[in-house]
Amino acid sequence: MTSPVKPPSPKVEDLVKKALKEALDKRKPPKTAEASTEDVSHETTTEDRELMAAAPTTGLKHNQIYLSEVIGQPVDHDFGITVFQESDWDERIAAFVPSINSTYVIDPKLASDILQAWELNEKVLCYGPTGAGKSSLIEQLCARTYRPFVRVNCTGDMDSSMIFGQLTAKDGSTIWVDGAATEAVKYGAVFAWDEWDVTPPEISMGLQWLLEDDGKLFLKEMPGSTKDKQIIPHKDFRLVAIGNTQGQGDDTGAHAGTNVQNSATLDRFGTAVFVDYLPAAVEEKIITSKYPTTVTGKAAKELVKLANLIRQGYKSGQFSLTVSPRTLFGICRKVSVGATLKSAFTLVYLNKLNDTQRKVAGELFAKVYGTSEN
């Protein structure tokens, strides 16, 4: 399993959690004598999901608050979102609930689409350009709903034990150690299958049954009977595949190693969302809030303008590398310790291009900032 997300300063996070908890407590129905945890099924059936889909959007169920309260923004269509508490999770997975990042801006439409899919227990495909914040989006939705977040970054040469598990020698005997996906399935975490489109096909096919409605995880390498090898997912387990492509391959050449995925695999995702770069005004706001003492509103506006010009060139094939938000943060970070803007841009981005592309990017820099040294 991946290491737990290390929490930053709890100041802002505690305030947000308190607000979410207060909103949740207000909406908790009174306990009845008939209620019993023993009556709760370990699985969410197809019938359950159909009932949820047909339920009126104005009503709230146990442990739900409205979407607008979860993300702290007005939305076009408000509906109930399940928000968990620490006591809801097994101690083996509770540490993987991420911390809330107060500077992260959540897109209301994306949040609505993904959280609704989670309420319906659908598998989600999340794709888009590099650095657009796909993984961060899933992580922050987990933080806001207090769901454990287990992320695995896949590579073309990865071993299946990373996801499923393996036999390991310990104290003179051989024991089975669960992989990241197995632990997420057992204890109800959100499994972030990152860079899913570079996963070797033989490993992807091992998740095929799990991707089905009411599917199970089959651990073929684990000792025991066939029944022992079948893992029934926890009712709160969710799966999100994250990548630069939607599994149809990459015609641009920008995403090396991505594969065309099996159409049967793609068909199993109940929701697919495209995560693009943020609107200019939002990106400017993030930059100024992250570097308030060194980046003015005018400077952020110019920097985002330069980034969008390069992004347009990237889409048309002029550049082999785009400018992501993390690129902009890198530039601002260098400026904050005394570097000139031009020097920071050169070190963080320009020097990664070939001679022809570097010349074009330099011309775009001059178009935004003029020919004077910055």
Image (cartoon, rainbow, N blue to C red):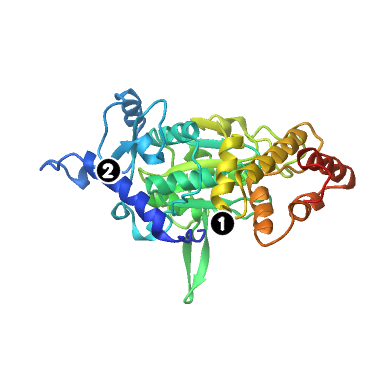
Residue located at (32% from left, 45% from top): 20
Specify whether 244 is left or right of 98: right
Report the residue marked by disc 2. Answer: 24
Q: Which mark is nearer the camera, 1 or 2?
A: 2
In the rendered view, does 280 fall on the left or right side of 358? left
Residue 226 seen: no
The number of callouts visible is 2
Q: Quadrant of residue 358?
A: top right
Residue furthest left in the image: 33
> Is residue 87 at all visible to an observer of this figure?
yes
Classify mark 1: residues with Cα within 10 Å, few (<14), some (14-19) or many (20+): some
Name which residue lies at 33% across and 43% down. 83
Q: Is residue 231 above or below residue 172?
A: above
The amino acid type, in three-letter code, at marker 2 is Leu
Q: Nearer the viewer, residue 134 or 289?
A: 289
Q: Residue furthest right?
A: 355
Q: Position of residue 35 (x, y in %)?
A: 16, 42
Residue matched to label 1 = 161
Counting residues from the start of the chain, the first of labels 1 and 2 encountered is 2
- Which residue type does callout 1 highlight? Ser
